[in-house]
Amino acid sequence: MKHFDRRKFVQLGITGGTGFLIPGIGTAAFAAAPQEILKVNILDFGAKQGGVERNTAAIQKAVESCFNKGGGQVIIPAGTFLSGAIYLKSNVSLYLEKDAVLLASPYFKDFPERQPKPAARYQESLKRAFIYAQGEQNISVLGPGILDGNAKLDGSGEFKEKNPDNPIFIWFDHCDNVLVKDVTFRRSVWWTQAYSVCRHVHIDHISVTENYFYNADGCDILDCDDFIVENCNINCDDDAICLKGFTNTGCTRGIIRNNKIRSLCNGIKMGTDSSGGFRDITIENNEVWQTEISGIALQIVDGGIMENITVRNILMNGIGTPITMRLGDRNRTVYGELTVEPGILRNVYIGNIKATVNTPEKYNDEERKRHNFHPYTSSICGIPDNYIHDVTLENISITIAGGFPAATADDALREIPEVSKKYPENMMFGALPAYGFYIRHVKGIRMKNISVDIKQKDGRPAFMLEDVHRSTFEDIKTQNVTPSPAFAIHQGCSDIHLD
């Protein structure tokens, strides 16, 4: 097997490469050097289609046979195949052909409980999995077929909403060289996919749909190094693409690009679990649409360091809040540790953003049963004596379409609580005293070429600064149908330049 080192992986992502050098399970980028790929069909091991008879044993036998022969592809052919948990082995690809449906069993007994090694806080949220691997390398799930979680929306099934014992579609733990490409995930009963403490992860051209259960995230990256999530179409109940840091490892050297995402919660989010932090992450060329909470949420509340973050070229349409940045001190501990060092949030660039703020549409009865959040102001907030440092925002256009309760001048006078230990979210402060950006406990913010246009009456200023220092605001344009100032600056601010 040929492996990428970390530096080469990052170069691959930046230059637009398409996959890993994994014989038998790589992508078309390596067609110039063809080789015979072992293909093992589950039908040859007794699998029966129809969605009634469980095929767990037959599929696992196919995986073991493929592994014992040095690796290759396990083929799920056209048809519906009911199955319980599958354990994927090194050098093995699970390939779902066109019109193939791998249907999850609706019973807990078919999904044994798994444990991360070593123990980690994410075991509180990840218990069981449809496709599982731990400590494996060169593994993939590929093909135009469908993974179906078999969610029972009427509550008649064993899997109930908001239950972390429910099985996730894919959970790969401590694995190296992971590729998930082209497959469709639908009807998840918990998080759709999670990659915990993995290296070299590539998620490409996947679709997530019909995820109506609460907590049905689209894609969760937990404490991973060197990852790419690209070209995906994700529409889900909970956060669409979510990075989390449960351990001291955190997430490092990642790219999230060219995705179209919708969520009844957040679009692209770092946190809330943030113990290990997030470093050297690029989020670019994504479209976020009809998302109820935040389009982009950058949050450090459990210690950890968030630094060297780039967010650029993002189109948002029908968003509750375009940008939420939060440094707090909820301070969940890493598993087995007793104390948490204060978090750090610094060196963030956000540029070329076009956003329309509106109450998102609900497209069917199931969605209408779910969340009902109103839009809130974009915010960049640290806490007293723990500042956010060195943030640049430029070339940002926000249009607040209206159609929700209007704020008044009284809201501009509200004293905003710190709530530093509260779960971080765009709505955590209530109505904020500005309609464009509320900025507090920040040093070194630079905002240039920012336009905020509100289409309904609003008695607040566009920008409110509180405990902000060493900061510059250039070429700021605001438009409000209610006469109000562009800036309100508290006396506790210093070294503020308005150009």
Image (cartoon, helix red, strand yellow):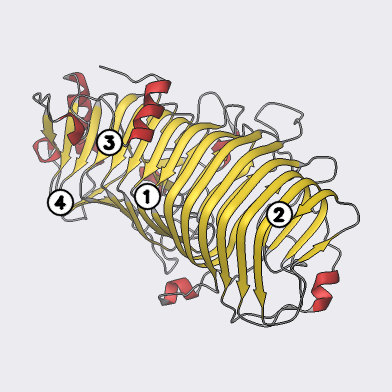
| Residue tagged 2 | 473
| Residue tagged 3 | 18
**Mark 1: which secondary structure?**
loop
Q: In the rendered structure, which amino acid carries the disc numbered 3?
A: Thr
| Residue tagged 1 | 258
Inter-mark Cα distance, 4 to 1:
24 Å
- Residue at the spot 71% in from the left edge and 54% down from the top edge: 473
Disc 1 + disc 3, Cβ < 8 Å: no
Q: Is residue 338 above or below residue 497?
A: above
Inter-mark Cα distance, 1 to 2:
30 Å
**Looking at this view, is 103 or 358 the one in front?**
358
Sequence order check, earlier mark of 4 and 3: 3
- Residue at the spot 45% in from the left edge and 66% down from the top edge: 155
Task: State whether residue 258 appears in this view.
Answer: yes
Q: In the rendered structure, which amino acid carries the disc numbered 2?
A: Phe
Front position among marks 4 and 1: 1
Indicate the position of residue 227 as horizontal and vertical percent values. Answer: 42, 34
**Mark 3: which secondary structure?**
loop
Sequence order check, earlier mark of 4 and 1: 4
